[in-house]
Amino acid sequence: MKKALLFLLFFALIKGSVYAADSPFNSPSNYGISGLMAIPNARVMKKNRYRFGASFVYPYWRFYGTFSPLKRLELNGLITDIIGVKGFSNNSKYGNYKDKDIDFKYQLFPEGKWRPAIAIGGNDLIGTRLYASQYLVFSKQIWPFDFTIGLGNGRYGKKQLGRSKSKFEFEMLHHPIEWFKDSKLFWGIEFAPTDRYSLMVEYNPTEFHNQTKDPATRKYFKKPVKSHYNFGLRWKPRKWIELDLSYQRGERFAANLSANFNIGKPLIPIYDPPYVEPVAYFKYPIERRIALALQESGFSNIMVKIEDKRLYIVAENTKYFYQTRALGVVLNILKSIHPKDKKLGVSIILERNFIPEFEFTTTVRDIVDLKDKRISKDNFLYLSKLRTQNIYVPKGEFSNIRMFDWGLKPNTETFLNDPSGFFKYRAGISLWGKYFPWKGGSVYVSVSKYFLNNISTVNKPLSIPVRSDIVLYEKQNFNLDTLLFNQIFKVGDVYFRGAVGLLEYEYAGIDAEVAKPLFDGKLLVGLGGSLVKKRSPDRMFAFADANKLKENVKKYYAPFFLKARINFPSKDLFFDIKAGRFLAGDYGCRFQISKDINGVILSAWYSITNTSVFHDSVNRGYHDYGISLSLPIRLFKGEDSKVVYDYSLSPWTRDVAQDIKHHKELFNYMRRTQPWYLYHHGNEIFK
């Protein structure tokens, strides 16, 4: 009853205020999720924003990263370091105790004229759940004040929540009555006279001395804290950086430093200068002039030909991240270099290793009218056509044929939370090269040299060590990562891919798959399988020796899968389902959801498999999960590029639901050339 009365009082106080946005009250709490200091509010970051930061409230160091992939949703990853508390009593090299957790907040309703912003959230949803809680929170503005009141269990409630092995726990939904009984009220007020400064006061109900599973309790919280009231100051010297200073628990000064950015916005603005034709080229035939312009603009495998009253332009985009941007470059060239006969049709065919991806058809007259602004961009696209199958490519002579490609890139791998040390890594460079012998075929090689490497472990490989022995490979300072032959071909709209060789630094063999798009590419379906053997960790061209490795090495591994990808163009989301047999022989499914934000792809996955094949307690009953990031280099380069860097992070090394790394996996290969994707990024044509 007391809780309900306080909520009613809160609504009575704020009902006369007017509508306001979440900013500037959507700054990070100590944990990274938007809030005041130790409590959340009902505010959220703007969509497609991310921030990272660190806070210090003795004895806790917290390092967080938060992003908003969808409107009104925040996701947060957090590492908590407890000063003076050993991670392992028998191992001083590990350092302080560290806890990892995943948090979220979803704003059910934004603030309205009479309605407060309302949000639900959960902290530390899986694993040890040392700092777990679920909360319902309300925020309302009476400018320049923002009032917050909420109800939370766990860390904010009467008792600490229990551990979960690898299953998400959310008592608010699973046991709502128990959640309400175990919850306590928290509240806060933020005063922001300007966008750069604000003052805060909050009531944090956390009973630190009763959080018995928190390793800090025994050493630092033997008796109740002096005060549940916290006071703070926020300062934003720039739009992208913030410093919070506070006095918490009636005894400790604290600080929180964070930086925030737009996801996918280039740090260095991308500028590709328009092509200017040299005067010396004017004497050449129109076909050669166009071919030279394409060559100097970043295209290869070029053919320009006039046949049956149509101008055919066939080329491979080797520079531009979006194929629609490459199409726009071709159209800009044709605005200034085109046949005099305006009745000619135009077919622009973009290929990849001589495999046609799509054809864009228009006329010379429409291109000229677009240049002279006699028709609008929308009308130009309406009069044009786009197709991705049954593409006719005339016979002719190609120029600027790409036979070889290579690159050099920095390479950093992390190995986190091993008992021998929390942060293990190796850093160096990778050199890769490709040879293209014929249509759809490629030979790919990649070698890596690491100049810094401290990766090691005290853990032994498990009962079926398909990945739990990864340290044997990662502790090497030189790796022949890949040496394979890959072949892709297309029949109608069905793609086939096969690869043979050293597929990755742990497995060699053969890998094949077939895939087909449905509903204009909004649904991709496929079938794939591999037959591989484990490679030796210290001999480039040898297979693993079970006696030497002192582990269970099978003669071969044969994973196979049925796969599907569902695309949601309006949300820039896609959902992957992979069902079948994984490397260790466990059967089940892997689910992955990915968000594309201006070319940056953020993914999270979760698996459900039958782990009865394992004879160790670590893998039994486990569910593999993790996150990954695909980052285009164009964000840092200042010019366009197709190169992307991939990084993935899984909480622990296990053998459950593991698969080999696939070179040019078809779903990813096909995605950017599906009709929905090309139309969705049509604005790139006119940039």
Image (spheres, rainbow, N blue to C red):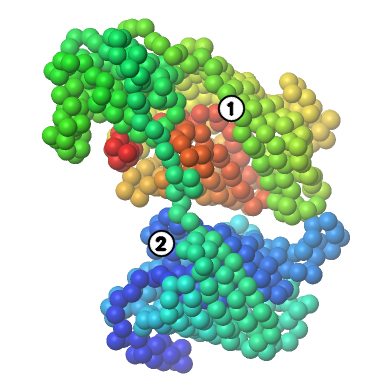
Structural crowding at the residue carrying mark 2, measured as other residues with C-alpha within 10 Å and reported as few (<14), some (14–19) or many (≥20): some
Q: Label 2, secondary structure: give it.
A: loop
Q: Residue at x 64, y 52 (%)?
A: 651
Is residue 129 visible in this depiction of the protein? no
Is residue 209 visible in this depiction of the protein? yes
Q: Residue at x 63, y 68 (%)?
A: 55
Give the left or right position of residue 354, taking residue 224 as reference: left
Q: Nearer the viewer, residue 285 or 277?
A: 277
Give the left or right position of residue 560, taking residue 356 as reference: right
Q: Amino acid at mark 2?
A: Lys
Q: Label 1, secondary structure: give it.
A: strand
Which circle, 2 or 1, is nearer the viewer? Answer: 1
Splitting the image into 4 quarters, where does residue 123 fall? Answer: bottom right
Q: Residue at x 83, y 35 (%)?
A: 550
Q: Residue at x 44, y 79 (%)?
A: 192
Q: Amino acid at mark 1?
A: Gly
Query: Would you name the residue on which mark 2 appears?
Result: 46
Query: Would you name the residue on which mark 1 appears?
Result: 407
Q: Nearer the viewer, residue 591 or 440?
A: 440
Splitting the image into 4 quarters, where does residue 141 fall? Answer: bottom left
